[in-house]
Amino acid sequence: MDLSAYKKKILIACSMIEDEINAAFNHFEIRDIEIWWQERGHHNDPDKLREVIQAEIRRAEEAGADLIMLGYGLCGNGAVGWHTEKAILAMPRFDDCVNMMLCTGNRDRRNYLKAGHMYLTGGWSKDEGALLDMFQSYLAKYGKRKADKLMKKMLDSYTSVTVIDTGCYEMEPVIAYADECAERFCLERHIVPGGNEVMQKLITGSWDDDIIIKKPGSSVIEEEFNFEGEAVTKNSQLMRMTI
């Protein structure tokens, strides 16, 4: 798709993936797409996310956008119902940003998350809901004994804090953060390769099956995120770093 055909292009994106989006923009030297950054915390409340982003879509159309791209996935069904009146809408066909960043080549399955792994990126390590910040919040509110108990219960099904290397941020501080989490909460620490190809496809117009394209008046539906007959993963918005 030749994006130069569109007069005004706006990307509405979660600040959680700011590193990856900025890396893609810099790599391709993109200067003709406006980025409207959105608050990180919206992913914690899919209903609020749906409402906020729909309002931003409406505002983008009022600003004259004829192509609106979204830096979001299904996000716990928060994306269901998003629509435009006049503009083309394009977004990744992934459950969430973590699944998107774990896809390092041609997509061959629905879910790239592994059980027991709590995934961490540069963006997720800065989130106020990240592990160490959460622990400090519990510590201040309840004291160490109850804070330890709450964290143990929360992390009962996890064995590893796993850093995704997308190549878009400095790894050293994120690995240090992961090491501290692993030591404090008795987890293993792993590093897995990631990628930024999906975001690159979105912003350059190299749209394939990884990108959902909606015509004006057509709403995003849950089934569009299915892959080769697989069912939608209802719990994809698990605790992230991802938590």
Image (cartoon, rainbow, N blue to C red):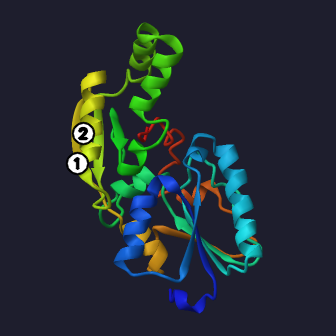
239 to the left or right of 34:
left
The image position of residue 24, as x and y in percent, is 39, 71
The image position of residue 102, as x and y in percent, is 34, 54
* Residue under the image location 38 percent in, 43 percent down: 125
* Residue 200 placement: quadrant: bottom left
Q: CA distance from mark 2 to mark 1?
A: 6 Å
The image position of residue 176, as x and y in percent, is 24, 39
* CB-based contact (under 8 Å), mark 2 and mark 1: yes
User: In the image, which disc is placed on residue 176?
Assistant: 2
User: In the image, which disc is placed on residue 6?
Assistant: none
Q: Callout 1 environment at 10 Å: few (<14), some (14 to 19), or many (20+)?
A: few
Dot 2: what SS?
helix
Amino acid type assigned to the residue bearing label 2 in the image: Ala
Amino acid type assigned to the residue bearing label 1 in the image: Glu
The image position of residue 44, as x and y in percent, is 58, 40
Q: How many marks?
A: 2
Toward the viewer: 206 or 40? 40
Quadrant (top left, top right, bottom left, bottom right) of the C terminus: top left
Label 1 belongs to which residue?
172
Q: Callout 2 environment at 10 Å: few (<14), some (14 to 19), or many (20+)?
A: few
> Visible in this render: residue 207?
no
184 to the left or right of 96:
left
Residue reaching furthest to the bottom: 5
> Visible in this render: residue 120?
yes
Asked if 211 appears above or below 224 in the picture, the reply is below
* Residue under the image location 41 percent in, 40 percent down: 241
